[in-house]
Image (cartoon, rainbow, N blue to C red):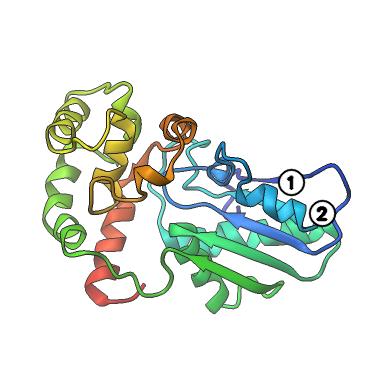
């Protein structure tokens, strides 16, 4: 990254050379680049490769492949995404690339774009959220009222507590989630819903997930800092990033 933090980009190739431009996929908060490679018949990476694109996956500072850190969207916008784009341009020799950006990878990458920090990107597909975060009332309530007491207990929320809760606060939060979420028996899935949204579950419909994907997601969600929720609370209150 531009501030010296070690990050990475991953090039995924198919059985033949790409015939179309590079495309950079940017993950969201508390996950990692492999979130785009769910165990389904054809995931988005497979589809892009099949259509001839040169696929690159960015692990920015929110990635769970790295040590927990109190990141902000501004840091990612300034230091992570411009360097990732620059690296793809250098490695491929293409002056122009495309980007598919998701969740908080979308918010932060959009910040990079409107600040003119990624001029090499000529097409951006933004998913889930962008410059104007709008959340359900329950999510807004949690950001406003639950965030502060949670910060007193922990610097991070971590759906991996559904597998092992190492501290007393982690055990308390996990117990609370288990008491209030009965939509499935996957504790990581339930903690994801508690952490990120409103609903039972919050981020997907179980009928749209095969059993393998529901099990796979146990290992694709982990630590997210309370610093992110502080920033998102201000953004939601303002109506924009």
Quarter of the picture containing the C terminus is bottom left
**Mark 1 closeness class: few <14, some 14–19, many ≥20 residues within 10 Å:** some
Left/right of residue 18 with respect to residue 9 in the rendered view: right
Residue corresponding to mark 2: 91
Estimate the x, y position of residue 116 in percent, counting from the top left.
60, 78
Q: Nearer the viewer, mark 1 or mark 2?
A: 1
Q: Residue at x 75, y 52 (%)?
A: 49
Left/right of residue 56 with respect to residue 192 in the rendered view: right
Estimate the x, y position of residue 148 in percent, counting from the top left.
14, 51
Mark 2, secondary structure of its residue:
helix
Choose between 154 and 209: the one closer to the eye.
209
Estimate the x, y position of residue 212 in percent, counting from the top left.
49, 30
Q: Which labelled disc corresponds to residue 107?
A: none
Rounded to the nearest whole Å, what is the CA distance between mark 1 and mark 2? Answer: 10 Å
Residue corresponding to mark 1: 11
Choose between 32 and 168: the one closer to the eye.
32
Q: Residue at x 85, y 42 (%)?
A: 15
Left/right of residue 179 with respect to residue 4 in the rendered view: left
Estimate the x, y position of residue 104 in percent, counting from the top left.
43, 58
Mark 1, secondary structure of its residue:
strand
**Mark 2 closeness class: few <14, some 14–19, many ≥20 residues within 10 Å:** few
Q: Is residue 157 visible?
A: no
Left/right of residue 147 with respect to residue 13 in the rendered view: left
**Residue 201 location, quadrant:** top left
Upstream in sequence: badge 1 or badge 2:
1
Tell whether label 2 touches label 1 (CB within 8 Å): yes
Choose between 183 and 202: the one closer to the eye.
183
Q: Residue at x 69, y 67 (%)?
A: 98
Name the residue at the front extreme: 207
């Amino acid at each position: 990254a531009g501030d010296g933090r070690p990050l990475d980009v991953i090039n995924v190739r198919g059985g033949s050379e790409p015939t179309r431009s590079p495309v950079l996929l940017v993950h969201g908060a508390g996950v990692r680049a492999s979130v785009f490679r769910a165990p389904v018949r054809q995931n988005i990476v497979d589809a892009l490769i099949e259509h001839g694109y040169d696929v690159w996956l960015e692990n920015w500072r929110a990635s769970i492949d790295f040590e927990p850190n109190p990141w902000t969207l501004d840091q990612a916008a300034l230091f992570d995404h411009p360097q990732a784009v620059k690296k793809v341009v250098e490695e491929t020799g293409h002056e122009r690339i495309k980007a598919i950006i998701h969740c908080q990878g979308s918010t932060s990458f959009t910040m990079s774009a409107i600040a003119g920090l990624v001029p090499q990107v000529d097409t951006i597909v933004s998913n889930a959220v962008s410059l104007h975060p709008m959340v359900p009332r329950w999510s807004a309530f949690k950001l406003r009222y639950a965030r502060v007491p949670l910060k007193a207990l922990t610097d991070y929320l971590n759906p991996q507590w559904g597998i092992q809760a190492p501290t007393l606060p982690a055990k308390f939060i996990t117990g609370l989630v288990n008491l209030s979420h009965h939509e499935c028996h996957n504790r990581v899935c339930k903690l994801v819903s508690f952490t990120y949204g409103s609903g039972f579950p919050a981020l997907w419909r179980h009928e749209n997930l095969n059993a393998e994907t529901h099990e796979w997601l146990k290992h694709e969600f982990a630590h997210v800092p309370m610093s992110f929720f502080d920033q998102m609370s201000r953004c939601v209150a303002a109506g924009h990033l």
